[in-house]
Image: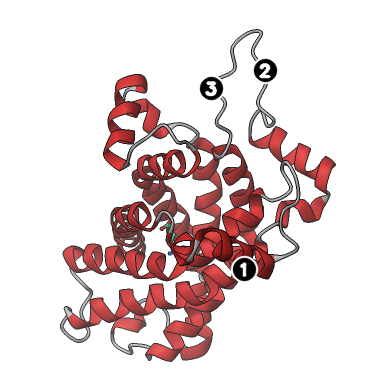
């Protein structure tokens, strides 16, 4: 089994994350705090009060987890394509796989990555939703003091299955959307690349960016459900299950609820996935 795809996926995932983290911070603050009037207001206030560093708060934990998850995604995708088509990454330029194969390989990568992502993502969302200011002497402690404390507390209070809360919504979010992700990427690359040649850097950047946008547009409804399921049970248990969460969110907030965070998600998706694919392709060509 070729391992380069796993390593390239690991490094490219980490690079994409660093670039996307400021957008993620703004998205989380807008979703969880009421003090901001919009995206620009949040950016200006964060910069004024905390300087550029404010946008990179809490990046170390996601960097470790996203790198692992991206490595699983790209590694499984590439190896599934190898199984389906018997063509390695190098041979794929001369013998391009068909779109159903790309879609199946993307869905397989998405399915497996969502299992690895579930506990990491749950911890990230729980920490991001803590709105208490930094701990000062004498002030009350936030519920979770960091990623390890958060994991231990969830295990103690909710059992091992607590770490997989919202995992079904995550599987439904990632399985089909990662199929679309790779189909969009390959489709744009093929459109702008002469037969048998490698796509140019510009093509890879544009195709990666649009693949990110296409996948996040389709992923956002289940992303909202997933985050709500992950937060359920922190204070009290509100939903009987995923379907109940969807129905009661829709009844209380209308259809718009399933598109919360769409603007900032798509704005973030372009640079993150452009850099992820560019570094992934670059590393694989370097090791060829
Ligand atoms: C819609 N989804 C879940 C994805 N496209 N996932 C794969 C890309 C992940 C990338 N690190 C990002 O955060 O955009």
| Circle 2 or circle 1, nearest the eye | 1
Q: Is mark 1 within 8 Å of ligand 1?
A: no
N-term-proximal mark, 3 vs 1 = 3
In the image, ligand 1 is in what quadrant?
Answer: bottom left
User: SS at mark 1?
Assistant: helix
Snapshot quadrant of residue 9: bottom left
For the residues marked 3 and 1, what is the alpha-carbon distance in whole angstroms?
33 Å
* Residue located at (33% from left, 55% from top): 263
Q: Which mark is residue 247?
A: 1
* Residue located at (32% from left, 74% from top): 185
Residues at discs 3 and 2 in contact (Cβ within 8 Å): no
Residue 288 in sight here: no
Residue 127 versus residue 151: which sits nearer the camera?
127
* Residue located at (46% from left, 45% from top): 31
Reading the image, the residue beneath label 3 is 133
Residue 221 versus residue 156: which sits nearer the camera?
221
* Residue located at (41% from left, 45% from top): 27
Residue 259 versus residue 200: which sits nearer the camera?
259
The correct choice, above or below, for 56 with respect to 88 in the image is above
| Circle 3 or circle 1, nearest the eye | 1
Residue 85 versus residue 235: which sits nearer the camera?
235
Q: Say how the picture is coloured.
A: secondary structure
The correct choice, above or below, for 27 with respect to 211 in the image is above
For the residues marked 3 and 2, what is the alpha-carbon distance in whole angstroms?
10 Å
User: SS at mark 3?
Assistant: loop
Q: Is residue 108 left or right of residue 90?
A: right
| Image quadrant occupied by the N terminus | bottom right
Q: Is residue 155 left or right of residue 10?
A: right
Reading the image, the residue beneath label 2 is 140
Q: Which mark is residue 174?
A: none
Q: Position of residue 240 (x, y in %)?
A: 75, 63
Residue 183 in sight here: yes
């Amino acid at each position: 089994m070729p391992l380069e795809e796993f390593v390239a996926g690991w490094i490219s995932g980490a690079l994409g994350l660093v670039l996307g983290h400021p957008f993620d911070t703004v998205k989380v603050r807008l979703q969880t705090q009421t003090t901001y009037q919009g995206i620009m207001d949040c950016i200006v206030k964060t910069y004024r009060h905390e300087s550029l560093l404010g946008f990179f708060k809490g990046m170390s934990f996601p960097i470790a987890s996203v790198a692992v998850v991206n490595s699983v995604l790209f590694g499984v995708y590439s190896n599934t394509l190898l199984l389906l088509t018997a063509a390695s990454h190098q041979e794929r330029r001369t013998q391009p796989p068909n779109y159903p194969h790309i879609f199946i390989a993307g869905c397989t990568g998405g399915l497996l990555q969502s299992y690895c992502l579930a506990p990491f993502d749950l911890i990230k969302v729980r920490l991001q939703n803590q709105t208490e200011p930094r701990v000062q002497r004498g002030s009350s402690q936030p519920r979770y003091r960091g990623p390890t404390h958060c994991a231990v507390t969830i295990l103690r209070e909710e059992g091992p299955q607590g770490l997989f809360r919202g995992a079904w919504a995550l599987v439904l979010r990632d399985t089909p959307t990662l199929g679309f992700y790779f189909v969009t990427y390959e489709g744009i690359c093929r459109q702008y690349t002469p037969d048998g040649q490698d796509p140019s850097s510009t093509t890879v950047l544009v195709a990666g960016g649009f693949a990110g946008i296409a996948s996040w547009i389709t992923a956002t409804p289940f992303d909202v459900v997933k985050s709500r399921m992950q937060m359920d049970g922190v204070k009290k248990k509100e939903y009987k299950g995923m379907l109940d969460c969807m129905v009661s969110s829709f009844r209380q907030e209308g259809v718009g609820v399933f598109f919360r965070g769409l603007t900032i998600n798509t704005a973030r998706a372009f640079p993150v996935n452009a850099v992820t694919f560019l570094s992934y392709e670059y590393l694989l060509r370097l090791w060829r």
